[in-house]
Amino acid sequence: MPVVYEEFEALKSFVEFTEEDEKNLASLADVVAKHGPALTDHFYDTLGSVPETAKIIEGRVESLKKTHRQYMVELTSGSYGNDYFERRARIGQVHVARGIDPRFVEGVMSVIRAGMLKAIAEEIDDPAELASKASSFIKLCDLDLAIINLAYSEERLDRFSEFTGMKRKLIENVITMPKR
Ligand code: HEM
């Protein structure tokens, strides 16, 4: 069962992601234009630094960097509706289909979060503006990760159901059964 747009909307409202956040993020487009490519390089250096992920990206780093730069640009598009949601859900599906351990997805999101916060702080002097825009950026990273992770767990359950023949409902009942 794929993760649906309504879940994204509910999450946005839960974390109080407002129009002000959208405007804040759109105003950070120049920061991504200036610092995004170096951040993307850092992202792939990190993935290249451990054997488990290095072997997955080997020989395709340059093409992966292109999609990642686009990913960074989308973070500051200012538009976070259904199209945005679909692209984020797809990232989860693509990674689980390639057998990428979700712990590395969680971990490497830290490179984006920390790197952008540093970049924003370099470009904005006013403390109140800096705090407000940094907070919007963190919210969006958290929303992205939540959607990627939801897509991950849904895809995993679907695959388990498909390969074992167990119905999704039965699997979910087993997972939520009280422990003896
Ligand atoms: C926050 C974490 C991550 C983000 C935002 C991200 C972003 C993306 C995006 C946007 C794509 C293109 C998806 C598409 O085709 O629509 C992609 C593909 C890919 N990513 Fe990631 N990624 C993350 C973590 C990782 C990790 C931990 C690995 C581990 C090596 C990885 C390896 C790959 C590979 C191999 C592909 C190509 C998949 C294929 O088309 O065969 N990514 N990623």
Image (spheres, rainbow, N blue to C red):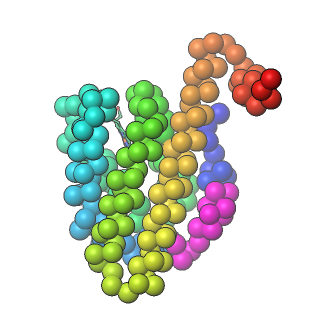
Quarter of the image with the C terminus is: top right
Left of 178 or right of it: where is 117? left
- Examine the residues drawn in magenta and state their main secondary structure: helix
Most extreme residue toward the top is 164
Q: Would you say residue 66 is visible in this rendering?
A: no
Residue 105, by quadrant, is top left
Q: Position of residue 118 (x, y in %)?
A: 32, 68
Residue range of the region highlighted in magenta in the rendering: 9-22
Most extreme residue toward the bottom is 126
**Above or below: residue 6 compared with residue 18:** above
Q: Position of residue 6 (x, y in %)?
A: 67, 52
**Above or below: residue 56 compared with residue 28:** above
Q: Position of residue 69 (x, y in %)?
A: 29, 54
Q: Position of residue 128 (x, y in %)?
A: 45, 84
Quarter of the image with the N terminus is: top right
- Quarter of the render that holds ligand 1: top left
Q: Nearer the viewer, residue 164 or 138?
A: 138
- In percent of the image, x 33 and y 81: which residue is there? 124
- In percent of the image, x 40 and y 28: which residue is there? 98
Q: Nearer the viewer, residue 115 or 40?
A: 115
Residue 91 lies in the magenta stretch:
no
Q: Nearer the viewer, residue 109 or 13?
A: 109
- In percent of the image, x 62 and y 50: which residue is there? 5
Most extreme residue toward the front is 180
Residue 107, by quadrant, is top left
